Image (spheres, helix red, strand yellow):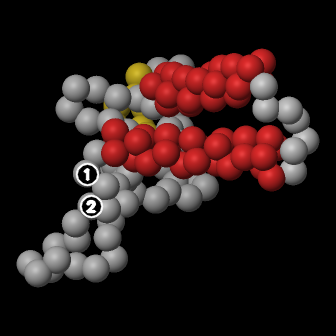
Amino acid sequence: MVLENKLASSEGVRQPLFRSASEITGICVVIITTLYLALVYLLFFKFKLLPWNKVSQGLVLLIGIIILTGFLVGLQGLTPSSVQATITGRIVEIEPQVSGRVTVVTVEPNVTIVAGDTLYGQSK
């Protein structure tokens, strides 16, 4: 899934909004870090709900590292990728539960299907 810029370039071809999946990952890391730092600011400095001492400083650092590491590890583990491309998005695998050999697949890639469409043909 590539996000496309709504404004067409001078040639009339839409340009991708992001150049790569790593750029999107970097933006997500910046957003998560900013939200976490805003939460820390509110808890420790704005509302003074918790004391800002050596223990709390260490915990804030440790929790921040755990959150970012969990996000990056989860992103690597849940996103299928290869040397040629990276796919980001929800992946739904369709596996027939039939006896026999599937002889023909009647749907095309990237085409919307609805309930009742024939997906495949099989030999019995």
Residue drawn at the location 34% of the way across and 39% of the way down:
22
Residue 99 spot, x, y in % from top left = 53, 20
Q: Regarding mark 2 in the picture, which secondary structure is present there?
A: loop
Looking at the picture, which amino acid does disc 2 mark?
A: Pro
CA distance separating discs 1 and 2: 6 Å
- In the image, 53 versus 112, the foreground residue is 53
Q: Which mark is residue 16?
A: 2
Look at the image and tell me whether residue 111 can be seen: yes
How many residues crowd mark 2 within 10 Å: few (<14), some (14–19), many (20+)?
few
- Give the answer, above or below, for where 97 lies relative to 47: above
Looking at the picture, which amino acid does disc 1 mark?
A: Arg
- Give the answer, above or below, for where 111 lies relative to 77: below
Residue drawn at the location 59% of the way across and 24% of the way down:
65
Residue drawn at the location 42% of the way across and 41% of the way down:
25
Give the quarter of the image for residue 18. Answer: bottom left
Left/right placement of residue 110 relative to residue 12 reads: right
Labels 1 & 2 near each other (Cβ < 8 A)? yes
Q: In the displayed image of the protein, which residue is found farthest to the right? A: 49
Q: In the displayed image of the protein, which residue is found farthest to the front? A: 53
Give the quarter of the image for residue 51. Answer: top right
Left/right placement of residue 16 relative to residue 24 reads: left
Q: Which mark is residue 19?
A: 1
Look at the image and tell me whether residue 95 can be seen: no
Q: Regarding mark 1 in the picture, which secondary structure is present there?
A: loop
Residue drawn at the location 64% of the way across and 43% of the way down:
37
